[in-house]
Amino acid sequence: MNQASPAAPPVLKPEATIGILGGGQLGRMLALAAARLGFKCHVFAPHPDAPAFDVVRRVSRADYTDTGALARFAENVDVVTYEFENVPAETAAFLAARVPVLPDPKILAITQDRLAEKNFVAALGIRTAPFAEVSSPAELAVAIERVGRPAILKTRRFGYDGKGQAAIKNGSDPVSAWREVGGQPCILEAFVPFEREVSVIAARGSDGAVACFDVTENEHRDHILKFSRVPAALGAQAAAEAVRIAETIAHKFAYVGVLAVELFVLGDGGLTVNEIAPRVHNSGHWTIDGASVSQFEQHIRAIAGWPLAKPLRHGRVEMTNLIGQEVEDYRRWLVLPGAAVHLYGKTSVRPGRKMGHVTQVFPE
Amino acid sequence: MNQASPAAPPVLKPEATIGILGGGQLGRMLALAAARLGFKCHVFAPHPDAPAFDVVRRVSRADYTDTGALARFAENVDVVTYEFENVPAETAAFLAARVPVLPDPKILAITQDRLAEKNFVAALGIRTAPFAEVSSPAELAVAIERVGRPAILKTRRFGYDGKGQAAIKNGSDPVSAWREVGGQPCILEAFVPFEREVSVIAARGSDGAVACFDVTENEHRDHILKFSRVPAALGAQAAAEAVRIAETIAHKFAYVGVLAVELFVLGDGGLTVNEIAPRVHNSGHWTIDGASVSQFEQHIRAIAGWPLAKPLRHGRVEMTNLIGQEVEDYRRWLVLPGAAVHLYGKTSVRPGRKMGHVTQVFPE
């Protein structure tokens, strides 16, 4: 894959229809951003009560493997994008044969596989945690020799919010970790003693222009993002390096749309790439209320073949996720001066489920 | 009508459905604001390609006199609101018998009639241009005697964007003005030599709290709003007086929702009320990108029985309407740093039609 490979996407007229695969809060916020620009959206999702269904006129409620529904969807939209990285490869290929799909599905093949993603990043000369491939308990023993302890065993595919992961500490039994992740193809990553977690939300237009939002600092609880703060507590040099890493990745993918690069800041000020998300990202939600353009609008602009905006930040910004039952406290947030409350319209509250978020902007 | 008359509206849960009468850009932006807060919306409008239809899951495409469609609409929503002041009285009454309608339809009876509105304002001790009722050419002659020339003859009902108006200058024939407005019941208003036009967007919650946005200065072209600027070039005392007038009107109506009060600033610094719009208003569009809460969200909060937010302005703000063919220039605006572009998804461009708007925020 190189910068020239995907054909330039069409430039959409404002009355065009954008197809969105996935009906969660990210799809919902993408559709709301598209509506500001005059676009129609058509959401394809399997769940009957997908939050994104509520904000569009046309929906396809069908499984991602339903080729009849996919074919009708493709006929009704001018471009397809997605809100989640685990779009089945066959679904993406089926659609791409009929309608432009952006970002290019070839990128999914890399970001869906932790090993391929780490290899891709390492090949760019960008630092990652030491890692090794693991396909069996025997390979795990060799990998531990190489990577050292403590380390984290992660399934190569379908992990999110800490799922599909097991720690291997000093003295703990590797075989039980192997069982814990289901004995699937894995990657063993050295545990990096990081000082903070940051992310860069980068947009790349079909003209090759890249616009990054300011580096965001993230705080997780139980492996789920809880707070984002902008700007990150990071030296100017490290911040510039984080942005450069995101730009390098976006260009190398010949990416069209928004991607997020999660990084660890080490004790020596160095950065390692933890993960790439080929989509809008929770750590970019602050941009809706905290910047002159949101990550969602940048994504829509990019896949529409429209020029990106230059993001201007309104101040220091804090984003708080409302997780599970925390959402029941929404009235407290409604009366907090300057707080922008977002609720995702999810019908049932479950522990660990992202139900909404709140953004606060402070003078800098 | 007094502050205690309407029953307190119910407090909606976030999963509730809000019914919106009218499918234009105001309905569209109301629905987008409601979606941020987790609400579902159901839009009722007669036009098949109403812009608001594109951003909601459920629509009723029917005439406002279709009682069958109205009854089904009322069954499917938890509260009804409207995006335009000319909702037929029978429609509002039919719905209000089945479901809470906010703002109270009784207010429409006043604001739909320029004479009733002027009498209402004058009874509050708030200054208006001198005016007189006109129901015949003979009454017009008397009214001109009383009000003087130059004056403007306006139909009492269904006027907007300069429609239903005729100027009566020195030497011009009153009877031709009477014919020009169709010989309908009218009001004659003295022409007030104003220095600038301003407006106040006020929100009143069901708890009686009022929150006003900063006074906005408006510039019209061909009777259509072209630019809004905030803050208005107005002394602190006049600005406070404008806000006090809007608050007084909101309280006297026992209003629940957002209303706009248009005022003229006279040469002596005095203010006269020109018009009241019982709805979100074009001169408040800047609040989407220029403030911590938008007029649309304030309206939704109010009719949902939720607390209002305290609006904080992000800086000096300018809003430019894209009217008719001006919208074809949207790419120029897309690349202007800091400009937030809104396109309304209207399928056909017509002269004088509001097609979109652009907001620019500047450091103050």
Image: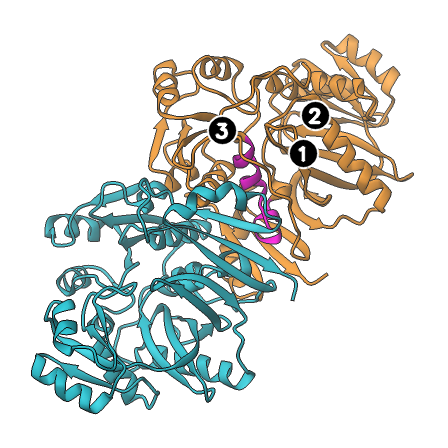
Chain colours: A orange, B cyan
Figure disc tally: 3
Q: Position of residue B78 (x, y in %)?
A: 28, 55
For badge 1, the amino acid type reads Val
Dividing the image into 4 quarters, which one contains the N terminus of chain B?
bottom left
Is residue B298 in view from this perspective?
Answer: no
Mark 2 against mark 3, which lies toward the viewer?
3
What secondary structure is found at the residue carrying circle 3?
loop
Which badge, 3 or 1, is on the more N-terminal residue? 3
Q: Which residue is tagged 3?
A: A11
- Horizontal side of B18 relative to B68 (left or right) equals right
Instruction: Report crowding for label 2: few under 14, some 14 to 19, many 20 or more residues within 10 A (C-alpha).
Output: some
Mark 3 against mark 1, which lies toward the viewer?
3
Boundaries of the magenta span? A285-302
Q: CA distance from mark 3 to mark 1?
A: 17 Å
Dividing the image into 4 quarters, which one contains the C terminus of chain B?
bottom right
The image quadrant that residue B290 belongs to is: bottom right
> Label for residue B244?
none
Given residues B68 and A327, the one toward you in this image is B68
Q: Position of residue A222 (x, y in %)?
A: 67, 40
Q: Position of residue B17 (x, y in %)?
A: 32, 51
Which badge, 2 or 3, is on the more N-terminal residue? 3
For badge 2, the amino acid type reads His
Given residues B247 and B310, the one toward you in this image is B247
Asked if labels 1 and 2 touch by Cβ distance under 8 angstroms, the answer is yes
Q: Which residue is tagged 2?
A: A251
Q: Chain of mark 3?
A: A
Q: Position of residue B305 (x, y in %)?
A: 38, 65
Which badge, 2 or 1, is on the more N-terminal residue? 1
The lab-note entry on whether marks 3 and 1 share a chain reads yes
> Label for residue A210?
1
Please tell me whether residue A289 belongs to the stretch shown in magenta.
yes
